[in-house]
Image (spheres, coloured by chain):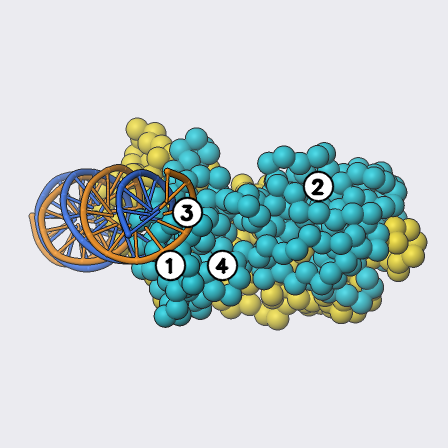
Chain colours: A yellow, B cyan, C orange, D blue
Amino acid sequence: MGYNPRDYPPVAVTVDVVALTIRDRRLNVLIVERGVQPYLGHWALPGGFVRPDENLDDAAVRELGEETGLGIRPAHLEQLGSYGTPERDPRMRVVSIAYLAFGPDLPDPMAGSDAAEAVWHPVDDLPPLAFDHERILNDGIERARSKLEYTPLATAFLPGTFTVSELRLIYESVWGTALHAGNFHRKVLSVPGFVEGTGETTQTGGPKGGPRAKLYTAGDAKLLHPALLRPSREEEIR
Amino acid sequence: MGYNPRDYPPVAVTVDVVALTIRDRRLNVLIVERGVQPYLGHWALPGGFVRPDENLDDAAVRELGEETGLGIRPAHLEQLGSYGTPERDPRMRVVSIAYLAFGPDLPDPMAGSDAAEAVWHPVDDLPPLAFDHERILNDGIERARSKLEYTPLATAFLPGTFTVSELRLIYESVWGTALHAGNFHRKVLSVPGFVEGTGETTQTGGPKGGPRAKLYTAGDAKLLHPALLRPSREEEIR
DNA sequence: CCAGTTGTTCTCATTATGAGATTGTCTCAT
DNA sequence: ATGAGACAATCTCATAATGAGAACAACTGG
């Protein structure tokens, strides 16, 4: 291994965060306008250098807070992957650890220390992103879609209590497909530990009519069993 | 972000590889005896520093070859995750990108440049490993178990042609559970693109009897649909 | 009050799974 | 050579899960 680290030129380690939420029935990602070189003025995922004595996870949480002004505490945060192509940063070798975060809809963030502006933006209508952040974002979206199949993490996009219809809207927004309301309802209530009834209902019906809906909280399951699979994607299998 | 990299103390980036194979019906991992400090003489996962102009994936393949003397070309290689706890290496801050590799059973490797010895070792009977490699290995094993459910990658543990029983043995070895032979057979042949018949059979029956088995090759599916799930793990769900 | 919307619960056909049994071919030990 | 046991491959049958559609009641805004 030739262990002496000084034999090797410096490498920088950063974290980048794909923070997702649902706004107005669309999947949105948090992006920041860069206030420093390189890519000054371009949009990018929030992120930055890992500090000397900081865990990677802590760095992701910190950057999310710093670059967006307010302390966004995601309901879910997981590692997405590492991106280390030698040319991905024009200035030096940078290896970035990407994170994926889910949270409920929040007020518009403020710009933070190193970002001129931070906004939620629909993922299907994005400006070009700096570095290889489009690739990271695509990987994050695909991971999110897959996570919704096998885990109850769709609830991380919702506030503490929610209705089955609100949960279905999360799935429809992330997957980009309409789901059968009756079957979805049956499925959600039949998977053990997915949601738990509160005994309460909404105070009014929907804005366009309909009865009051029962309210639920997230259950204690870590995995959905059986899974809630996307409508078959024959084409994508091969 | 305070972009100037020289503001930060040096960070080293390494790759570590969890290389798995099946030997004698048991899941084995490739480990090396370290020939350098730290942890000199301890067992560890193969790995080492990423070179200045090298992709992370390439570094993983290179280390696998270097440390084991012969060019092990895994049938499957994927990124497992990043491990960057500040204290994980006693000498300096090291962030390691872990990889997961599957391959068919191979002859015993030779020791490579920086390793005194390299051997395949059953995962359920391991000596203590250096650094946080036990945690990385456990994450790799769990990832492998899960991958076998949703992808046809079990074939990556087998040579070009194989029988359904050999494929079942892979599942049983990785999952550590016995499977119903008849149902497994039905399932493998019913999932589109999992395996393809060659029209050939084995030359003889099994060592203890039985008819000749039909031979198959890996199909072109990238995902199993429907998935081949492990027998229910009620306990592990919550 | 009316028309339209929506939450919730059914039904019914189809597909997938788990458990067990059957059949025929092969190897090994007698 | 023969019989015992192993094992590949296929089948049956009960149960579970899914997809599609319909029913019905509770609610909305006009």
Whether tag 2 and tag 1 are in contact, CB under 8 A, the answer is no
Residue type (three-letter) at the residue carrying disc 4: Thr
Tell me the residue that label 1 is attached to: B213
Tell me the residue that label 3 is attached to: B208
Tell me the residue that label 2 is attached to: B133
Please tell me if label 3 and label 1 are on a single chain: yes
Report the Cα–Cα distance between label 2 and label 1. 40 Å
Badge 1: residue crowd in 10 Å (few <14, some 14–19, many ≥20) = some
Badge 3: residue crowd in 10 Å (few <14, some 14–19, many ≥20) = few
Badge 4: residue crowd in 10 Å (few <14, some 14–19, many ≥20) = many
Tell me the residue that label 4 is attached to: B155
The quadrant of the image that shows the C terminus of chain A is bottom left
Asked whether B220 or B238 is in front, the reply is: B220
Report the Cα–Cα distance between label 1 and label 4. 17 Å
| Helix, strand or loop under label 3 | loop
Q: Nearer the viewer, mark 2 or mark 4?
A: 4
| Helix, strand or loop under label 4 | helix
Residue at left 41%, top 47%?
A: B208
Residue type (three-letter) at the residue carrying disc 2: His
Instruction: State the image coordinates of residue A24 (x, y, percent, origin top left).
Output: 43, 56
Please tell me if label 1 and label 4 are on a single chain: yes
- Sequence-wise, which precedes: disc 3 or disc 1? 3
